[in-house]
Image: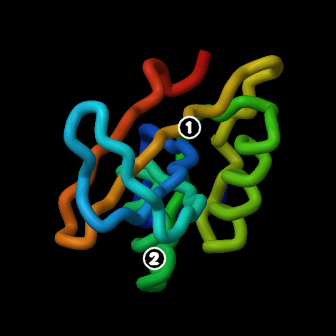
């Protein structure tokens, strides 16, 4: 393993984000202006930000060997994060979260029960 300035150990997931005018009340239907998919998770986000600032950063964690796990691996690599310690778990499922963001910045996150099952 090459010499790194920082190593992040923690969560990485896929965030599906919906942009809405306001967060809905119970039983209210709101319409999304836009849907986006991001690689998320506090540690993964920090690792990408640190790499963008020129730091040498590695990430230790786990993802499933599914489509989302492969997307996370490729995205982190492309951002300059050392993923040599990111484990792809055979028959695993990568965590997926739903994030609803209102125009005023309020948000609701529906988080996967487990990082990976």
Q: Label 1 crowding class (10 Å Cα cut-off): few <14, some 14-19, many 20+? A: many
Q: Secondary structure at mark 2?
A: loop
Residue carrying label 1: 96
Q: Earlier in the sequence, mark 1 or mark 2?
A: 2
Pick the quarter of the image with the C terminus: top right
Q: Residue at x 19, y 59 (%)?
A: 106
Q: Secondary structure at mark 1?
A: strand
In the rendered view, would you say 88 is above or below 16? above
Q: Residue at x 26, y 72 (%)?
A: 103
What's the distance in space between the residues labelled 1 and 2, CA to CA?
Answer: 27 Å
In the rendered view, would you say 29 is above or below 103? above
The x and y percentages for residue 52 are: 48, 81
Please identify the quarter of the rendering in which residue 2 is found: bottom right
The x and y percentages for residue 39 are: 56, 56
In the rendered view, would you say 49 is above or below 59? below
Please identify the quarter of the rendering in which residue 62 is found: top right
Q: Residue at x 46, y 43 (%)?
A: 98
The x and y percentages for residue 33 are: 47, 70
Please tell me whether mark 1 or mark 2 is closer to you in this view.
Answer: 1
Residue carrying label 2: 55
Q: In this orientation, which residue lies closer to the viewer: 92 or 101? A: 101
């Amino acid at each position: 393993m090459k010499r790194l300035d920082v190593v992040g150990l923690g969560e990485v997931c896929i965030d599906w984000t919906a942009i809405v005018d306001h967060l809905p009340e119970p039983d209210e239907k709101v319409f999304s202006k836009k849907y986006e998919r991001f690689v998320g998770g506090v540690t993964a986000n920090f690792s990408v930000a640190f790499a963008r600032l020129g730091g040498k950063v590695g990430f230790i964690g786990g993802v499933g060997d599914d489509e989302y796990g492969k997307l996370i691996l490729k995205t982190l690599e492309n951002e300059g994060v050392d993923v040599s310690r990111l484990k792809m778990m055979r028959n695993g499922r990568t965590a997926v979260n739903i994030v609803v963001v209102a125009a005023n910045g309020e948000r609701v996150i529906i988080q996967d029960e487990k990082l990976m099952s």
